[in-house]
Amino acid sequence: MTNETKTNETTEGAMGTDANGTEQVVMRSTEEIIGRADVNDLTAILSLVGREEPSGYHRVKDNCEAEFTWNYEKGRLEKLDKLYEKAKTAQWNARTDLPWDTPVDQEATLMANFATNPEQMGWDEAMLEGTSLAKWGPKEWLQFGIESQNWTLSQFMHGEQGALLCTAKIVETVPWIDAKYYAATQVVDEARHVEVFSRYLDEKMSGHYPMNAHLGLLLDDIIADSRWDMTYLGMQIMVEGLALAAFGFMHQISEEPLLKQILRYVMADEARHVAFGVLSLQELYSQLSAAELRERQEFAFEAAVRMRDRLRSQEVWERMGVPWEDVVTIARREDPSKDDFQILLFSRIVPNLRKLGLLDAADGWLRQKFTQMGVIEFENLSDSTEDQDAFADGSPVARGVA
Ligand SMILES: [Fe+2]
Ligand SMILES: [Fe+2]
């Protein structure tokens, strides 16, 4: 199987209602959902590179109505109330609770890492043959390692800002007081996460990157959707589900004590956030019609594809001066079934989507999509309502992240 296996699907899409209010299927193609006909089109994926607006700002219409509730009964939604109480006692201070005076030598850390894992200094020769990377020596690979770290931390920071904006929107739009209370604690959590990654980049790394183009497309779509549950589905289930796995992976491979500590704290918060999404949507989604569920499935599919595509660090290749044709050549030689990192990321979201009933609704449309993407095997891992306690003390002990 190659990365460019065609899906050959043209008859898929959302549903709607006709003039009489009768539910009807309105088919949407893969192209309408993700902007390209072939989900695995590497040329399209790799040629999209993130850019920062010269103004220094990026504005998106959030299309929402702020909603008051007159039902102030605290604890009516018991599990959310419990999560809110837990969140209040689990707060930490990004400025005073972390050892910011820890010296970090980015180059020395990478060199030490290369010494213990020599396979990371350069890739398999057959993969690079005939490309400009074939001529790279230790100096270029070291620079690539440094740029990749700067890029990864930058994407964490931008994603955290996306979470900050989304959670503020949830406070406004979710109709239940218990959820508004909990979401308010998450706003503080996310502010702290932006703060730690931004400070780590400024003080310990050696450069910033703009937001990855695929991540940007996803965050724009999440923020622009007027329906409050779509904010949860996009942010709490998809983006945060993947972020939790990415933080766990980083924690596992990093030898740098300050970053490890930051990630432990952040993961403890993120595990609650994903649980908040699952708990809030579970009941709602059990009451939606097949047509409404299909729209959610398509949104989850779009998010999954964008999150996968963002992992290709397009912006790093560009900064290293590698022609994108070379990047495409190398990507075509990869075996996606052996891409542990990509696969690991889906270990969080597939069980959560199963728990929400989104895998099998609408004739199993999403199950079929995830089977094609090679990630359906993760459906039987524990979901985030089961394992968020594992992170409560800041220990990344859930499967795949310890
Ligand atoms: Fe966060
Ligand atoms: Fe979060």
Image: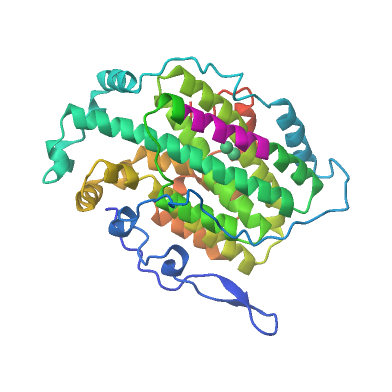
Image x and y of residue 39, in percent:
37, 60
Look at the image and tell me whether residue 304 can be seen.
no
Colouring method of the image: rainbow
Q: Residue furthest bottom?
A: 19
Residue at image position (54%, 25%) is: 264
Q: Is residue 345 magenta?
A: no
Residue at image position (50%, 33%) is: 198
Image x and y of residue 101, in percent:
49, 15
Image x and y of residue 325, in percent:
20, 53
Q: Is residue 360 above or below residue 18?
A: above
Q: Is residue 348 left or right of residue 174?
A: left
Q: Quadrant of residue 201?
A: top left
In-front residue for pair 26/166: 166
Q: Is residue 159 above or below residue 142?
A: below
Look at the image and tell me whether residue 280 can be seen.
yes
Q: Quadrant of residue 155?
A: top left
Q: Is residue 354 left or right of residue 253?
A: right
In-front residue for pair 265/15: 265
Q: Is residue 387 left or right of residue 114?
A: right
Q: Is residue 197 magenta?
A: yes
Image x and y of residue 236, in percent:
60, 46
In-front residue for pair 131/282: 131
Q: Ligand 1 appears in which quadrant?
A: top right
Residue at image position (70%, 84%) is: 20
Q: Residue furthest front?
A: 55
Residue at image position (49%, 36%) is: 245
The magenta region covers 187-200
Q: Quadrant of residue 108?
A: top left
Q: Is residue 88 above or below residue 6?
A: above
Magenta stretch secondary structure, dominant? helix
